[in-house]
């Protein structure tokens, strides 16, 4: 078990120092499609205008977690606290020996050369944050420009928003020349139930050919109490609606968690509860991410 030590002046809790062994074995080739690396800050400083300061969560601890869980490949999402400096992310991808991919953050004036450099480093998508605690959302023109910029590289757009705003942004997202991926089930409220309009809007993405959804962050949609079973019906609804365009991720090291800190071994078992069908698990954990992120370079 890895032991995490929180440095001074952080405002986020560290992940659990020890996790339980999952009761279920992940299939060979499983991807963790949403995780992060933070620092180490002495080597990779955080952005001066960051909205939060997490404890170090470097590549070595992420790789150890994946080894413990049986995860073969991963997608590291650029943390907002690192801004557009991708040093920590690129170093982690390089250290993985080709097993990891990345999703970056681009400045509104990013150019093709920047995208080409990031692509060479293993980045395959760009993220836009529409949740208020991470700052002002991007303007429509910026989203359109960046999507057109990354399209020739085969990238996707990752979208971090809440359920209430999904329907506002959907007309734009559908028109993008790239696939778009909704992070963390659009942070819908599990307590509202699977019949709520926000959840139904997510499930209706089955009719939108370039839409994908991550059934990650179950703790962020549930009541905040482990094992977050309240979120399982929402996960099941999404998996049933988008079996070929659903993805799973741990969200390690769980930044800005307000409730119980997730146990990543327990999260594996929660996914198995939501997805008892063997064939569907293979699609969500292995086949779907192979298609979106690229099995081989």
Image: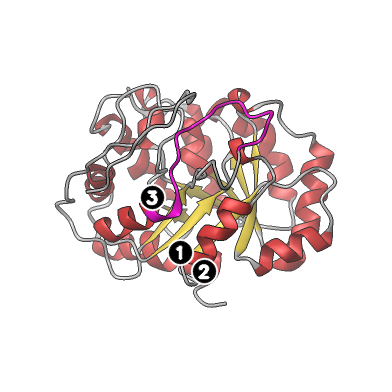
Say which residue appears at 59% left-offset and 35% top-offset.
81
Say which residue appears at 30% left-offset and 35% top-offset.
262
Q: What residue does disc 3 label? A: 239
Residue 232, x across and y down, in percent = 29, 38
Determine whether the residue tagged by mark 3 lies in a helix, strand or loop: helix
Frontmost of labels 3 and 1 is 1
Determine whether the residue tagged by mark 2 lies in a helix, strand or loop: helix
- Residue toward you, 52 or 109: 52
> Residue at the left extreme?
23
How far is mark 2 from mark 1, CA to CA? 5 Å
Q: Residues within 10 Å of mark 2 (few under 14, many from 20)?
A: few
> Residue at the front extreme?
42
Say which residue appears at 48% left-offset and 35% top-offset.
200
Look at the image and say whether residue 29 sits in the magenta stretch. no
Residue 107, x across and y down, in percent = 77, 44
The structure's colour scheme is secondary structure
- Relative to 47, does residue 98 appear above or below in the rendering? below
Which of the 4 image quarters holds residue 114?
Answer: bottom right
Q: Is residue 132 left or right of residue 228?
A: right
Q: Which mark is residue 38?
A: none
**Magenta stretch, residue numbers:** 46-60
How far is mark 3 from mark 1, CA to CA? 12 Å
Q: Are marks 2 and 1 in contact (CB under 8 Å)?
A: yes
Frontmost of labels 3 and 2 is 2
Q: Is residue 242 visible?
A: no
Say which residue appears at 33% left-offset and 65% top-offset.
282
Residue 103, x across and y down, in percent = 59, 53
Q: What residue does disc 2 label? A: 291
Q: What residue does disc 1 label? A: 288
Determine whether the residue tagged by mark 1 lies in a helix, strand or loop: helix
């Amino acid at each position: 078990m890895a032991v995490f030590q929180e440095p001074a002046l952080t405002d986020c809790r560290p992940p659990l120092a020890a996790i339980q062994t999952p009761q279920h074995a992940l299939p060979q080739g499983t991807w963790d499609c949403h995780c992060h690396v933070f620092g180490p800050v002495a080597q990779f400083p955080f952005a001066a205008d960051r909205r939060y300061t997490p404890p170090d969560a470097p590549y070595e601890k992420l790789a150890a977690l994946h080894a413990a869980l049986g995860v073969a490949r991963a997608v590291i999402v650029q943390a907002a606290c690192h801004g557009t400096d991708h040093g920590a992310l690129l170093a982690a991808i390089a250290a993985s020996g080709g097993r990891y991919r990345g999703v970056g953050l681009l400045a509104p004036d990013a150019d093709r050369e920047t995208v080409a450099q990031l692509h060479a480093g293993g980045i395959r998508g760009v993220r836009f944050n529409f949740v208020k605690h991470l700052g002002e959302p991007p303007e429509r023109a910026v989203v359109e420009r960046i999507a057109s910029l990354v399209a020739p590289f085969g990238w996707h757009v990752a979208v971090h928003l809440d359920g209430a705003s999904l329907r506002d942004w959907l007309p734009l997202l559908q028109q993008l020349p790239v696939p778009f991926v909704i992070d963390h089930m659009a942070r819908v409220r599990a307590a509202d139930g699977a019949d709520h309009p926000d959840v139904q809007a997510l499930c209706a993405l089955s009719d939108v050919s370039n839409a994908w959804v991550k059934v990650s962050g179950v703790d962020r949609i549930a009541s905040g109490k482990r094992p977050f079973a309240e979120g399982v019906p929402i996960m099941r609804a999404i998996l049933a609606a988008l079996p070929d365009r659903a993805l799973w991720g741990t969200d390690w090291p769980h930044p800005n968690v307000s409730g119980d800190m997730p146990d990543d071994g327990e999260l594996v078992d929660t996914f198995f509860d939501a997805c008892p069908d063997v064939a569907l698990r293979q699609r969500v954990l292995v086949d779907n991410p192979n298609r979106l992120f690229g099995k081989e370079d």
